[in-house]
Amino acid sequence: MLSILDRHAIGQLLRTKGVDAWGVAANTPRLPLAPDYAIAISLIMRVDQLVVRGLRHGPTEDYYEEYLRLNLALDDATGTLVDVLRVHGHAAERIAATGADSGNGNQPFPHKTAATSAGLGWIGKTALLVSPRFGPAVRLATVFTDLDLPVGDAIVESRCEECRACVDACPAGCGRDVQWRAGMARDDLFDAAACRHQMTLFGNVDAQICGICIAACPYTRPH
Ligand code: B12
């Protein structure tokens, strides 16, 4: 049991849970679709690099396994963090890695909103969170709480500049080659319906996933 719950203690806890990066965002004023807590903690787990390399032409079984593994690991990390926050007398609620169980009807809180607001990255040209350390090869989850923590500097615009690697790689042409700014409507950036349809076309994996845009990003490659 952690005796003092501060940024350092939370960092230690999250490391033991396999979290690769995390940050804190202010949730006042309330972020779109967010529950009513002052603080959002954004968690990142990196997708295995070897698995990402196999994604250049479409999804693989290995990627699907990794996707499931990361969703479970993220949900374990957020579940533990919520438990620890509550034991210390704080209100806390987690948003699951995937699915629509945020308590906001059918629309989940978008994890990317907390991640950019915490300064963990920006939104790229195919609407993914691009971490400067890991590229878009990450999965995300979020915990909301009333614990007072120092917040990160929000990133409010894209750093992709002229790069259009993900736009050119996408077989469905989902990216519109637009530079993201915080608050921009997703449709101005990205065609989610075309992405969703494309994911039904891959016959080799029994799941609706893709990942070509993740593999295409120069930030994904090890440097
Ligand atoms: C529904 C869904 C889909 C749908 C729709 C995609 C979409 N972009 O909306 C479909 C089925 C098409 C899809 C596809 C994929 N998805 Co998906 N999906 C989700 C899910 C469950 C909900 C997303 C949603 O509906 N959001 C509503 C829209 C409006 O928001 P958004 O586009 O997600 O995010 C916007 C806001 O965050 C806003 N924003 C960002 N910063 C800020 C700051 C401020 C202040 C404001 C106001 C707004 C703002 O800009 C973002 C971009 O438009 C999330 C999990 C979650 N709860 O976030 C995963 C999630 C977005 N998916 C993810 C992934 C990886 C994928 C796929 C690669 C599939 C795969 N695993 O193979 C593809 C690629 C899609 C792509 N290039 O964007 C990851 C993204 C990781 C990352 N690096 O960004 C998520 C976060 C899951 C996770 N736990 O990691 N997905």
Image (cartoon, rainbow, N blue to C red):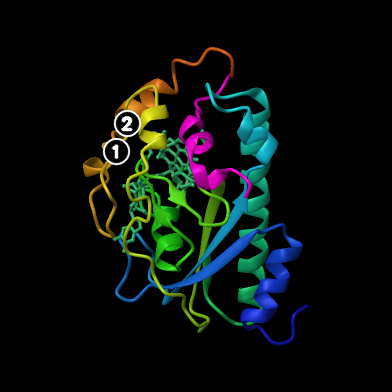
The residue tagged with tag 1: helix, strand or loop?
Answer: loop
Rendered image quadrant of residue 104: bottom left
* Three-letter code for the amino acid on which mark 1 is drawn: Phe
- Asked if the magenta segment contains residue 213, the reply would be yes
From the image, tell me which residue sits under label 2. 174
- Asked if the magenta segment contains residue 203, the reply would be no
Viewer-nearest residue: 100 or 53: 53
Q: Bounds of the magenta span?
A: 206-223
C-alpha distance separating marks 1 and 2:
5 Å
Verify CB contact (< 8 Å) between mark 1 and mark 2. yes
The residue tagged with tag 2: helix, strand or loop?
Answer: loop
In the displayed structure, does residue 3 sit left or right of residue 100? right
Image: 221 above or below 60: below
Mark sitting earlier along the chain (1/2): 2
Q: Please give the name of the residue rendered at 37% of the width and 43% of the height, measured from the top-left corner.
A: 163
Label 2 residue near ligand 1, CB within 8 Å: yes
* Three-letter code for the amino acid on which mark 2 is drawn: Cys
Q: Please give the name of the residue rendered at 65% of the width and 58% of the height, measured from the top-left corner.
A: 20
Viewer-nearest residue: 195 or 109: 195
Viewer-nearest residue: 178 or 150: 178
Image: 220 above or below 10: above
Rendered image quadrant of residue 192: top left
Viewer-nearest residue: 167 or 188: 167
Residue 101, image x, y percentages: 47, 48
Image: 26 above or below 93: below
From the image, tell me which residue sits under label 1. 190
List the single residue furthest toward the top.
Answer: 203
The answer to whether any part of residue 141 appears in the image is: yes
Label 1 residue near ligand 1, CB within 8 Å: yes
